[in-house]
Image (cartoon, rainbow, N blue to C red):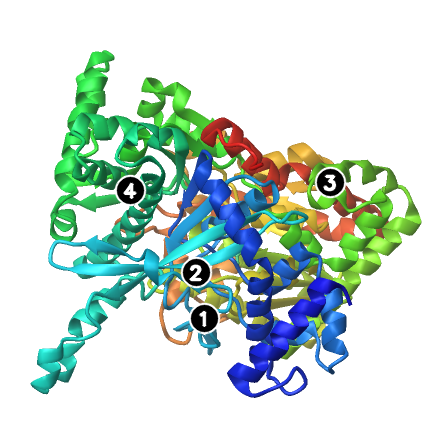
Amino acid sequence: MNERTKAVKAAMNFALKTDYHKTLATATPAELHTALSRSLVGVITDDWQKSREQHLNARHALYFSAEFLVGRAIFNNLLCLGLTKEVDEMMRAEGVSLADLEQVEDAALGNGGLGRLAACYLDSAATLELPLDGYGIRYRYGLFKQQIDNGFQKEVPDDWTKYGDPWSIRREDETVLIEYGCRTVRAVPYDMPVLGYGTDHIGTLRLWQAEPVEPFDFVRFNNQDYDGSVAEKNRAEDISRVLYPNDSGDEGKVLRLEQEYFFSSASLQDMLRQYKKRHGNDFSQFAALHAVQLNDTHPVLAIPELVRLLMQEGLDFEAAFAITRGVFSYTNHTVMPEALETLPRHLLERAVPGLYPIIEKIDGKLRQELSEKGVPGDVVGRLSITRDNCAHMADLAVFAGRYVNGVARLHTEILKNRVLRDWYSVYPERFQNKTNGVTQRRWLALCNPELAALLTRLLGSDRWLTDLSALTELTRYENDEAVMREFLAIKRTRRGEFADWLQKTHGITVDPTRLFDVQIKRIHEYKRQFLNILAVLELYYEIKEGQLNDFKPTTYFFAGKSAPGYRRAKAIIKLIGEVARVIENDPQVRQKLRVVFVPNYNVSCAEYMVAAADVSEQISTAGTEASGTGNMKLMANGSVTLGTLDGANVEIVEEAGESNNYIFGAHVEEINDRANDYNPHGIYESDGRVHRVMDALVNGTLNDGGSGDFRELYDSILHGADWQRPDQYYLMLDFGRYLDAKKQVNRDAQDELAFAKKGWHNICMCGKFSSDRAIAEYARDIWQIEKVK
Ligand SMILES: *Cc1c(COP(=O)(O)O)cnc(C)c1O
């Protein structure tokens, strides 16, 4: 046992004894997890403090994000410390093991891609020794847990700190106060270490928790008004109670706004306090020392807030705004117009009265500056931040920031040509592309140890862990049958591991010798799970009728959550379950084709599924998915992509070749050209396959439990609704081409070796999609930060 492991063991024994009166041998998995995590935090404390000082003393970057989907920390941190094997052996000697900790659930402080990206970026920056820290909200409840109840999604609270939160350190002494219109709350920071791989450099994720100034109202309690005595406390705690509260009504909108202001203001106050310790009241170096990245528009209130805070320090508006303009940059994550956040003026004035006058001042500045540049009046009007009595957050971020970036090449082009076109015409130099990436530590090394070992052996070193492009060298094994057989065996192993997990956690049995085709992501109309399940239904009919005889047995997996109030997405979940049921009841077809919905998709589930998958479904309507990152995780694990030319798929096939992937469907240009004369009903009338699968929704074949949901889905395609055109995501347009591509994948998969070669080529060419590459680009082109010494 090495020195570090000895120290960990001693610390674990001490913690188990003092906290639980237990030993390694008698502790529960949750207790072991807490004790081991606390012990590791102890081991890294000195390095962590040193890194923190280094960040504060150099130009450094701060990642402001309403979401950080970090997933389970323990295995990743052991990997980074190089202690996985040692600690496992030490625990095994006591009759327990690291595998026991699999049962401990992970924190889901994010919805999906955007939050997971933030987590990958912190991981990469720590590994690259770049001074980047994260700021966000410590939600009491993270994203809901999804249960499937009679085929319908049911949401239950995710009490992620139920067994404690051993990776966080509460920093009571660094509490700040947040002033709202009618009250003040405390923001208490909790710090999580972000370990780099192969370095002792450690970043910090600081999450703010909302607490009342007074724990309860003593006088009211004494007067026996018990509910009233904690009303203020509850109101304060509501601010960090849940991730994305329902904001369909004004009360919900105000709460959202209060959340956004809460972590923006707390983080800036924290930065200013640290700055003042070093530079006193001379703010001239503030912009030179800080780069803030706004992850989508959620933290954009930080812009007027920094102006306000600097004015409170005695600067005038001009001086404060000049500094502010040197600090922020903004990442756009969506081209959906409805997702470009606008905050109604009356709600802003109610929740944070101090900010609206500043937003108006910034708008005045915008009008002045654009006129000086000779921008025509109608364009200035379109760009105004306060038009229509709302604050337009994306416009504010572009105007008052340094740079704006899209998250894949195609997405950035769409921003320039369509979504932010007027801005691009005025400030073209502010626009950048930063194609997303994922960390290969979690999404390859940790989730697929067998594949990782093979890559390391063939490469003669594990340098791909910090230089993913090194894998290109391994293309030379494509024609090496022994290596391809080994790769196939690894895929088989991973399918088996996933099957075991699925059995254990959800009681679902699957056959790991089949082809695994996966579509795993949030459920959304634009992502088109609906198209996938319709095509699977068509395959079912064709197999049943004997038209499709050479079909390799395949299981089509779906996993993902729907927003709680999103009726159609919930209907799609029910539909997937119904198609699964119809096939299950058909003993003949069941041998060839199965559909499985995996409940409660989260990071840990994703880790199993990306390693097990053979085919990666990335079938969003061209022009709708900004980038995607699930596509990258699956590529790195040797899946072939069955996808449209959308988001980062474009770059994935550019790297790995169209011949190693399955690209189908309308391109952005075709969609744009067709927009005015598109007639889905015509396709339904003329294509018997489309007709039959659509009719199954309403003729009693598929049962929506009397909810009317399937009729509504049917109408959404063929008739539209008063607020939208029929089939706005072009399912009918792509159906035939998609079905052909799906069959082609299946035919090709029958030649195992040839198919393995395609998957292998994808692994070898995935280097571009490392978040290390992405973060190095942000550091160089946007933040101008350098490695700490
Ligand atoms: C990667 C990931 C996502 C994003 O998936 P996309 O396919 O890019 O939409 C969402 N949720 C979880 C849990 C993930 O790990």
Distance between the Cα atoms at labels 4 and 2?
A: 20 Å
Q: Earlier in the sequence, mark 1 or mark 2?
A: 2
Q: Is mark 2 within 8 Å of ligand 1?
A: no
How far is disc 3 from disc 4 in space, using C-alphas? Answer: 45 Å
Q: Label 4 near label 3: C-beta < 8 Å?
A: no
Q: CA distance from mark 3 to mark 2?
A: 35 Å
Disc number lying in front (3 or 2): 2
Residues at circles 1 and 2 in contact by the CB criterion of under 8 Å: yes
Residue 660, numbered circle: 3
Q: Earlier in the sequence, mark 3 or mark 2?
A: 2
Dot 4 amino acid type: Ala
To which residue does mark 4 refer? 302
Locate the C terminus by quadrant: top right
Residue 762: image location, x then y, percent: 72, 42
The residue under the point 37% across, 75% down is: 706
Q: Which residue is mark 1?
A: 160
Query: Counting residues from the N terminus, which is met first, the one under dot 4 or under dot 2?
Result: 2
Looking at the picture, which amino acid does disc 3 mark?
Answer: Asn
Q: Nearer the viewer, mark 1 or mark 3?
A: 1
Tag 4 near tag 2, CB within 8 Å: no
Between residues 300 and 315, which one lies in front from this camera angle? 315
Mark 3 surroundings within 10 Å by alpha-carbon count, few (fewer than 14), some (14 through 19), many (20 or more): many
Left or right of 449? Residue 216 is: left
Q: CA distance from mark 1 to mark 4?
A: 28 Å
If you read the primary sequence from the N terminus, does the residue marked by circle 3 or circle 4 appear first? 4
Circle 3 sits in a helix, a strand or a loop, which is it?
A: helix
Residue 680 visible, this angle: yes
Q: Secondary structure at mark 1?
A: loop
The disc labelled 2 sits on which kind of residue? Leu
Is the C-beta of the residue carrying label 3 under 8 Å from the nearest atom of ligand 1? no
Q: Secondary structure at mark 4?
A: helix
- As measured in the structure, the alpha-carbon distance from the residue carrying label 1 to the one carrying label 2 is 9 Å
